[in-house]
Amino acid sequence: RTVYLNGEYLPETEAKVSIFDRAFLMADGVYEVTSVLGGKLIDFDGHAKRLERSLGELDMKAPCSKEDLLQIHRELVARNGIEDGLVYLQVTRGAPGDRDFAFPDPETTEPTLVLFTQSKPGLADAPASRTGIKVISIDDIRWGRRDIKTVQLLYPSMGKMMAKKAGADDAWMTEDGVVTEGTSNNAYIVKNGRIVTRSLSNDILHGITRAAVLRFAREAQMEVEERDFTIEEAREADEAFVTSASAFVLPVVQIDEAVLGDGAPGPVAKRLREIYLDESRKAAI
Ligand code: PLP
């Protein structure tokens, strides 16, 4: 596999980053995941814009222009022959000569830019999209700037492990009984045809898939409510689902012990998944 590191396309075994890189020592980096369907990028523009925002919030220098980023994404997809899969991009504050809590001078320390691809044949037809997934609820103990897409992912990893141990597929995080989001996705419930999802703030990641799905839902005259909802309300919902760049729209059929509806993916989640995939494929670049 060919990967990209700071201006070069290299075999993955030859791409090396300093042990003083701030991402390695301090999780001082941000990332994006863009999916690829039929060899084309889904919602590249949204991901590039959010990257710019994440960098700005952390006073980090952009490693290159948006046009260059698009070119690098396309080049990697082509070189690795990716039909369906994803492109992972990471920008870190780079590697100053030593370890220090204070940020290094951006004039002397260049950001580290890494991109690689993952091939995922049949990405849009994952078995979980037909069966739906089971989630457990766990406390959200992450920091207060979840709107910044940092590589600080230890707690989400632990959440996935807690879910696995409990025989579930994923976890929804809650604060005072109110759902924030999934470990790597945004969370939604449906009651009497109304789609409910938490509104945007620093408490959750501003999902690129979320923005698209809510737009498509409104265009299809579906009712959307952006507000807090509790885990109890979720357990009594008619259906539920999650969204993310790599899972698109994925039905949730069980929350803790509560089976939703008849335990199969609900009509709203199924319809939104179809619309999202159709529209995104049409707009892919
Ligand atoms: N929330 C969290 C915590 C995430 O990690 C992700 C994606 O990785 C999302 C939401 C969904 O965001 P997007 O739709 O941009 O992939």
Image (cartoon, rainbow, N blue to C red):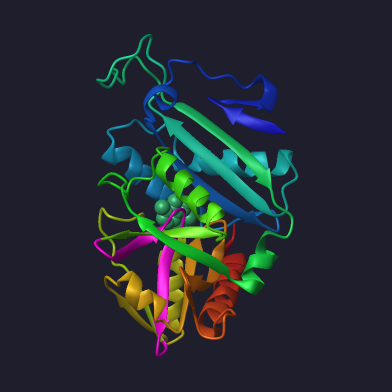
User: Is 79 above or below relative to 243?
Assistant: above
Q: Residue at x 42, y 27 (%)?
A: 23
User: Is 190 contained in the magenta span?
Assistant: yes
Given residues 72 and 115, the one toward you in this image is 115
Given residues 55 and 197, the one toward you in this image is 197
Residue 99 falls left or right of residue 68: left
Q: Residue at x 45, y 41 (%)?
A: 31
Q: Residue at x 46, y 45 (%)?
A: 158
Ligand 1: give its quadrant. bottom left
- Image location (x, y in percent) of residue 261: 51, 85
Residue 167 showing in the rendered view = yes
Task: Work out which quarter of the rendered image holds the C terminus and state it.
Answer: bottom right
Task: Work out which quarter of the rendered image holds the N terminus and state it.
Answer: top right
Magenta segment, which residues?
176-193
Residue 218 showing in the rendered view = no
Q: Residue at x 67, y 59 (%)?
A: 123
**Based on the displayed image, in which of its 4 quarters is residue 52 positioned?**
top left
Given residues 133 and 18, the one toward you in this image is 133
User: Is 130 above or below relative to 182?
Assistant: below
**Based on the displayed image, in which of its 4 quarters is residue 237 positioned?**
bottom left
- Image location (x, y in percent) of residue 218: 40, 81
**Based on the displayed image, in which of its 4 quarters is residue 41 positioned?**
bottom right
Residue 72 falls left or right of residue 187: right
- Image location (x, y in percent) of residue 18: 49, 16
User: Is 203 contained in the magenta span?
Assistant: no
Q: Please, which residue is most extreme toward the top here?
A: 97
